[in-house]
Image: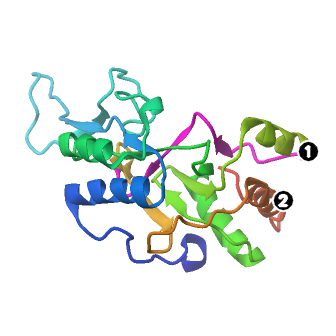
Amino acid sequence: MREILGRRRKPLFRRGGRSALLGAALHCATEWQWPVLPGVGVRSAGRQSAGGRLGLGERGTRECSCPDPDCVVPGAHPFDPGLLAATTDARMVRWWWTNRPDAPIVLATGGSAPCAVSLPAVAGARALAALDHFGVRLGPVVATPTRWSLLVSPYDLPELGELLHSRDWVPSSLRFHGEGGYVVLPPSQIGAGAVHWERPPAAGPAAPWLPKVATIVDALVTASTSAPDGGSRLAY
């Protein structure tokens, strides 16, 4: 289990509750120059009984705060403001999280900001164990209950297209978060649950080191095709 899930480290931002979100958002924006904005967040919704009232002992559910009743990523996306509002300006960040202290932290990927490669959580745990075995140096890894995101250095769409075209095959479970994309950062709470650092950035003001996307993709392809039974380690 330890090999699969990796070692847990002390959280980068130790202050609890709402102050932790504001502190983390300010640190990302001002110390690391990562453009961030508040995510839409979630709201509590009680399960109603046949009479229309919340039954005794019934537990509430958490729904997305956006207008879409069938949102597939509740709480874990931008809405108002939109993604283009992402900024590194401390005054704007402070204003956002002062007015919405529970809002998830959304990193706008691409440009000069980090990009990411994500995969389902179970496959992500297996992938990290395999990459550690191969001696691949990883950057920060963000984990949600449903997906894990490996942060990589910035790339543009032509670079990604050339990379994928030059490979015979890549795992279909991979998603790429480049320019125009986003990743939710710790210590956010989304509909699926808590967001945390599976591999935290090193403490300090310096922006975290990030591997190249080609290095991570090649390592994930190797990990996926090296399963002892001939199957894929990254299947889900």
Residue 211 image point, x, y percent: 69, 62
**Residue at the image position 58 percent from the left and 33 percent from the top:** 180
Between 193 and 100, the one nearer to me in the picture: 100
- Seen at 45% across and 53% down, the residue is 145
- Please state the horizontal and vertical placement of residue 191, each as a whole percent of the image: 35, 42
Residue tagged by mark 2? 225
Q: Report the residue marked by disc 1.
A: 166
CA–CA distance in space, label 1 to label 2: 17 Å
Q: Amino acid at mark 1?
A: Ser
* Position above or below: 64 against 130: above
Q: How many labels were placed on the picture?
A: 2
For the residue labelled by badge 1, is the local secondary structure a helix, a strand or a loop? helix
Task: Tell me where residue 118 appears, x and y as whole percent.
Answer: 61, 50
Q: Is residue 149 left or right of residue 197?
A: right
Q: Which badge, 1 or 2, is on the more N-terminal residue? A: 1
In the figure, residue 139 lies in which quadrant?
Answer: bottom right
Image quadrant for the N terminus? bottom right
In the image, 57: left or right of 81? left
Q: Nearer the viewer, residue 181 or 111?
A: 111
Quick check: 216 above or below 113?
below
Residue 195 visible (yes or no): no
Amino acid, disc 2: Thr
> Is residue 162 visible from the viewing direction of this image?
yes
Residue at 34%, 46% (x, y): give it. Answer: 104
x, y (%) of residue 16? Answer: 22, 65
Mark 1, residues whose alpha carbon is within 10 Å: few (<14), some, or many (≥20)?
Answer: few
Tag of residue 130: none
Q: Is residue 43 left or right of residue 200?
A: left
Is the magenta region chiefly helix, strand or loop? loop
Q: Which residues are magenta?
A: 168-188
Residue 50 located within the stretch drawn in magenta: no
